[in-house]
Image (tube, helix red, strand yellow):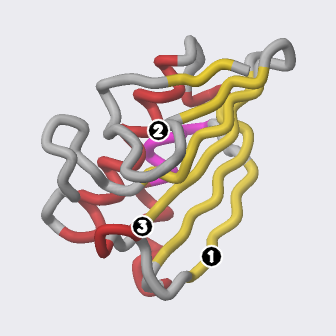
Amino acid sequence: MKTVTTDKAPGAIGPYSQGIAAIPSEVLFLSGQIGLDPVSGNLVGGGIEEETKQVLANIRAIVEAAGLSVESVVKTTIFLVDLADFQLVNSLYADFFGDHRPARSTVQVSGLPRSARIEIEAIAVRA
């Protein structure tokens, strides 16, 4: 296994890594990403839209640090504090992935670290 890290996504705020590449199967497991700015380490302002955009940017950065692309993502799990945000998140998610459609689950949770409103974890595979 290989730990994947990049300064283009926020560092871990707990005892975990940004991602783990399982070699030789070449599966990348991304830790759940919240809307942390990779430079400041703070949650971005602007509500669910800006948080979602930052989460997706963080996912892109980690996947690319592993030498993959967002088209390599095969599964995501979205954790939302408020399912009323689902439609907006879904729209931003669709724009991010374009015609690529990873398998996905969405779950409502009672809270997330740093009072984030969204967290997304992902699995990517080298084809």
- Secondary structure at badge 2 equals helix
Q: Is residue 123 magenta?
A: no
Give the position of the N terminus as an image quadrant: top right
Q: Is residue 94 magenta?
A: yes
Q: Is residue 52 left or right of residue 79?
A: left
- Secondary structure at badge 1 equals strand
- Secondary structure at badge 3 equals strand
Residue 86 x %, y %:
48, 75
Residue 12 x %, y %:
40, 43
Q: Earlier in the sequence, mark 2 or mark 3?
A: 2
Q: Residues within 10 Å of mark 2 (few under 14, many from 20)?
A: many
Q: Is residue 107 left or right of residue 6?
A: right
Q: Earlier in the sequence, mark 1 or mark 3?
A: 1
Q: Nearer the viewer, residue 2 or 45?
A: 2
Q: Earlier in the sequence, mark 2 or mark 1?
A: 2
Residue 68 x %, y %:
59, 17
Q: Which residue is mark 1?
A: 107
Mark 2 vs 1: CB contact within 8 A:
no
Q: Which residue is mark 2?
A: 59
Residue at far front of view = 15
Q: How many numbered circles does the render carry?
A: 3
Residue 76 x %, y %:
65, 51
Q: Amino acid at mark 2?
A: Ile
Relative vertical location of residue 1 with respect to residue 51 in this rendering, above or below: above
Secondary structure mostly seen in magenta is: helix
Q: What distance separates the C-alpha of mark 1 from that of mark 3?
A: 10 Å
| Label placed on residue 118 | 3
Mark 2 vs 3: CB contact within 8 A:
no
Name which residue lies at 28% across and 50% down: 36
Q: Which residues are magenta?
A: 93-99
